[in-house]
Amino acid sequence: MAVLAQSVEHQIVALGVTGSNPVDRPKKEIVSLAISFFVFLATFRPNLRILYIFMLIFFGSFMRSEILRKILPLFTLLLVVGGQNAMCDMRPIQFTKDTLENGLQVIYHIDRSAPVVATIVHYRVGSRDEDPNKTGYAHLFEHLMFEATTNIPRASIDKYVQEAGGDLNAHTSFDETVYYLRLPSNEIKLALWIESERMRGLLLEPVGVETQRGVVIEELKMRRNNQPYGTLLDEICNALFPGSSYQWTTLGSEEHLRRASIEDFRN
């Protein structure tokens, strides 16, 4: 730490931030002390990196841009060093990995610090697996997984979890669809039962498809049509990945979603 602070002081002297002018010295000493202070903090607290940015902008107002350009590489180096220190301080998570007879990979970690259990199920399917003329279907299918199974009535999955004091959600990306449940630890059987039911006995009904179609179309309008720069990600993907399955986003096309039929998901 002393070496880092000394290096900063040497850099400041080399840049002419300190000087012999008694009038300018207090201001320049404040700059020097502030830089040293933030170096000290960020070495141990990498989450303070954003403060570096504001600090550079603020102190750059009374330092020549030439000086700011020279200081920036030094701060970049310090950010990297601080980040590496934080990574070294992290304790690795000890986990066990098993593969079931049906090929399902199970990774689990035991942490008794809180009476809570969480299950996260990853399906290796996402928007990249869609037909270019049927985009948004992976996201719609994610919603259908909350409808019903052969042993769970419609609109009951959320009810079971919430009544047990838990919460649940899911998301779809280009490469995968992920479902997660969080419950009191004594309810682990409920979480595993729900996920096994969705895997083995998902029940698709016309009313469920129509309900979730409306939900995902409204989500599309909210996230894309009704906010500034909502189409930015779509434009970026279209420009970067033309002709590939990454050309469209997980929200897909409203036109395609409106054409979706229950057979598209049963097949």
Image: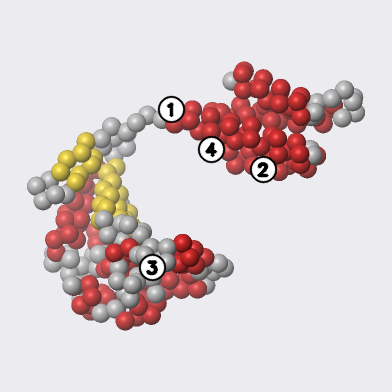
Q: Which mark is residue 88?
A: 1
- Residue beneath the point at 48% across and 30% down: 84
Q: Amino acid at mark 1?
A: Cys
- Residue beneath the point at 35% across and 59% down: 174
Q: Residue furthest front?
A: 243
Left or right of 16: which side holds 200? left
Q: Nearer the viewer, mark 4 or mark 1?
A: 1
Quadrant of the frame with the N terminus: top right
Measured from the top left, where is residue 23 in percent x and y?
A: 90, 28
Residue bearing the label numbered 4? 47
**Could you say whether the residue bearing mark 1 is in a helix, strand or loop?**
helix
Q: Is residue 113 shown above or below 239? A: above
Q: Amino acid at mark 4?
A: Asn
Residue bearing the label numbered 2? 54
Q: Amino acid at mark 2?
A: Phe
Q: How crowded is the residue under tag 4: few (<14 C-alpha within 10 Å), some, or many (20+)?
A: few
Q: Alpha carbon of mark 4 to alpha carbon of mark 2: how far?
A: 13 Å
Left or right of 217: which side holds 120? left
Q: How crowded is the residue under tag 3: few (<14 C-alpha within 10 Å), some, or many (20+)?
A: few
Return the residue nearer the eye: 99 or 187: 99
Q: Is residue 85 shown above or below 68? A: above
Going from the N terminus, do you reach mark 2 or mark 1 first? 2
Q: Which mark is residue 243?
A: 3
Return the residue nearer the eye: 3 or 166: 3
Q: Alpha carbon of mark 4 to alpha carbon of mark 1: how far?
A: 15 Å
Q: Alpha carbon of mark 1 to alpha carbon of mark 3: how far?
A: 42 Å
Residue 4 visible in the displayed image: yes
Q: Amino acid at mark 3?
A: Gly
Measured from the top left, where is residue 123 in percent x and y?
A: 25, 56
The image quadrant that residue 15 belongs to is: top right
Going from the N terminus, do you reach mark 4 or mark 1 first? 4
